[in-house]
Amino acid sequence: MVLISRARDFLAAGPSDAVDLIAHVCQLPSPPRFVADHMAMALLAPWEEFARDVDGRWALVADAAADSWLSGAPQATTGSPAPTPTRRAPRDAARVYGRLSDRLDELSYVVVDVETTGGRSFGSDRITEIAAVVVTGGEISRVYETLVNPQRPIPPMVTALTRITWDMVKHAPTFRDVVRDVADAIRGHVFVAHNVGFDWRFVTAEIARATGERMEGRRLCTVKMARRLLPQLHRRSLDYLARHYGVEITARHRAGGDAVATAKVFLRMLKDARAQGCTTWEQLEAMVKPPSLGRRKHRRRSAMPRFMDRDTTA
């Protein structure tokens, strides 16, 4: 891509302010700062080779400062200590997990659920509510949840599903306001969600927009776990799994209610996995990996996986 190549060449000389960077990359004479900041974030945030420091300057990852904002977030205390982030790349400091342990009963987990304005994580949609439920030692140890001002309208069909209205979020903090709290809740744990790709994409996109950093880490999907552990179930939606395990969902399609219910279901599935002899992370990864079916015909993905995936809905 021509613009990315120009940015790479320009930043090879050292970190740059967004105004100077965009003026060179997009050949715009003296663009307004708010325009330059927006354009730089949209252009560079999705690429792991670029990073933005606390002063808003952009740099190549190899040249970026090591004292990333995420490196100060508390580490998990379960299992062995996580390593100190290296100086080579801010993306190391942005990992959500450390090398804690390979034993499932020694790992800590954070079960995440987000409600959003739609399904385009790197497009125009934003998070309206986020919850993170920390699981350590086989039980829930912390619950973090907050409404988020998406700074754009919430479609009526989304409000009908989540019951989150504009009046509820218009005075709520933006994601930039809570990004440090989110980092505090998720860092040091395996990232777990029901249809993990959806929640992971939104959280990583929001963090990239707010900080310029990329989030990395172990991820685990409870839908995939259920497909392997509970093949007898007709569907593996959260409602079906909760009913199977006798788990009550106190607030369906709200981040807190869904995340807590998913955490309780996840704990039961971990117990089932151990009963089948699965005790390490590598064994769990191998178990949830779908069997190879040869060459498969690709289907176009829905823009709203929560609405269309029969294993994530009621």
Image: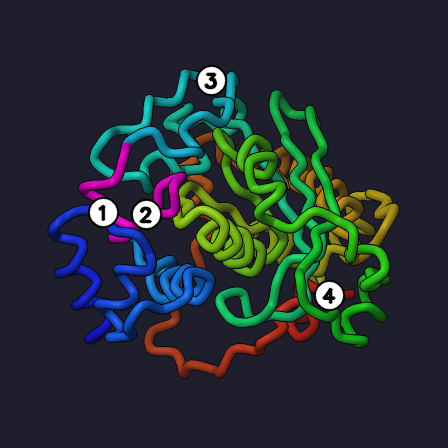
Residues rendered magenta in the picture: 49-65
Q: For mark 2, does the 10 Å Cα neighbourhood hold few (<14), some (14 to 19), or many (20 or more) residues? A: some
At x 33%, y 42%, the residue is 91
Q: For mark 1, what is the residue?
A: 15
* Residue at image location 74% in from the left, 52% down from the top: 241
Whether the magenta-drawn stretch holds residue 314 is answered as: no
Figure quadrant of residue 151 = bottom right
Q: Nearer the viewer, mark 3 or mark 2?
A: 2
**SS of the residue under disc 3:** loop
Up/down of 125 relative to 88, above or below: below
For the residue marked with disc 1, what is the amino acid? Pro
Q: Is residue 52 found inside the magenta-colored segment of the image? A: yes
Tell me which numbered mark, 2 or 4, is placed earlier along the sequence.
Answer: 2
- Res 163 visible: yes
Neighbor class of circle 3 (other Cα within 10 Å; few <14, some 14-19, many 20+) is some
**First of labels 3, 2 by sequence position:** 2
**Closer mark to the observer between disc 2 and disc 4:** 2
Contact between marks 1 and 2 (CB within 8 A): the answer is yes
**Disc 3 marks which amino acid?**
Gly
The residues bearing labels 1 and 2 have C-alpha atoms spaced at a distance of 6 Å
Pointer 1 or 3: first along the chain? 1
Q: Which residue is mark 3?
A: 79
Q: Which mark is residue 57?
A: 2
